[in-house]
Amino acid sequence: MNIHERLGLTQVEADLRQLEILLTESVVFGDPYLDQVTTHLINAGGKRLRPLLAVASATGGAREATRDDLLGGVALELMHLASLYHDDVMDEAEVRRNVDSVNARYGNLVAIVAGDYLMARSAAIAADLGTEIAGLLARTLAWLTRGQVAEVRTSFDTNRQIDDYYQAIEGKTASLMAASCRVGAITAGRPSGEVDALDEFGRCFGMVYQLRDDILDMVATDGQLGKPAGQDLAEGIYTLPALHAMKDAAVGEELRGMLGRALNDDERERARKLVVSTDAIAATYEAARTFVAQGRTALEAVSDEPLRKGFASLLEALLEGLPEA
């Protein structure tokens, strides 16, 4: 998916090129070793989805982004990058964005400390933007932490509840998307009703984004994913498709008997096929469509028509190409 084509706001794409410069400048300290570590994933690229949400929410593509608009996006992206540094240590990941993960190249201790540094830089930028944004990012960090704990707490738990799953993805994914939209709306001085509406859109966008990823983990090819399909099953992360499949009358018992422990490659593939053989993918797709509808409803309160249409298009694009059954 080309996010800029779907958004349809040409100025935002130009603004993000300026944001890239600020993003690197914000973490360069003057220490060659530290600078190399903190810019490692920045230089590897990425969709910059959170800055895009922030800048678009601020400008609607109708004007050039101000420095504050751009810095709001930088603060959110740094928080996201910090979470990736920490997640890769926890997951013992070796690759991120088609390059060595920071922990694989520099070691776990350096990765953790560098992640802390990125988080500190995010907080400092937020503080410069004012107490409202500083408080928002602090609350978002708390949500991220709660989401991570919710996921870790239920790892390898075949009795994981759907509510636990939603709590985890709202914290780990949706909270940062919501904060991105809210920060942009705040730096632009939008009316409070539109600030809240864009926040809710961002939350729904994040929920759909994660549900999409969890469907793809079951149905996409290894080449599309950049990792083995069904890897979450192998690592004990039981997402919505797995939770639905474990309740299936035909295969649920067999699937539950396989899970609850780490899986080898053959077991992972067997478990994945069991999930796909049920209506779990269709149920997850319908859950995503519910959040799409909620996101579109939230956008009705946004007066900026190009932004409203662009965000609606971006939201719908998340489900394109996914199996509905």
Image: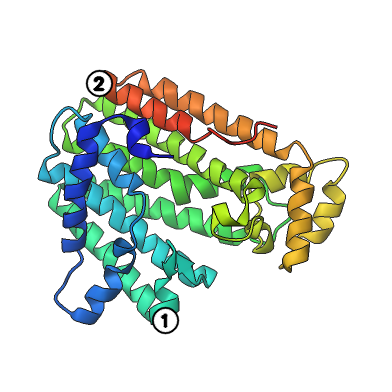
Q: Is residue 293 above or below residue 41?
A: above
What residue appears at the point 49 percent right and 36 percent down from the top-left corner? 318
Can residue 192 be seen at all in this image of the molecule? yes
| Among numbered discs 2 and 1, the one appearing first in the sequence | 1
In the visual, does 159 lie left or right of 186?
right
Q: Is residue 48 above or below residue 321?
A: below
Amino acid type at image mark 1: Gly
**In the rendering, which numbered label is found on residue 304?**
2
Q: Position of residue 74 (x, y in %)?
A: 23, 52
| On-image quarter of the N terminus | top left
Q: Is residue 111 above or below residue 168?
A: below
Amino acid type at image mark 2: Asp
Q: CA distance from mark 2 to mark 1?
A: 47 Å
Circle 2 SS class = loop
| Image quadrant where residue 197 sits | top left
Of 174 and 137, nearer the camera is 174
Q: Position of residue 228 (x, y in %)?
A: 63, 60
Task: Tally the marks.
Answer: 2
| On-image quarter of the C terminus | top right
- Dots 2 and 1: beta carbons under 8 Å? no
What residue appears at the point 32 percent right and 49 percent down from the top-left corner? 48
In the visual, does 297 lie left or right of 289?
left
**In the rendering, which numbered label is found on residue 107?**
1
Circle 1 SS class = loop
What residue appears at the point 16 percent right and 49 percent down from the top-left corner? 18
Of 101 and 112, nearer the camera is 101
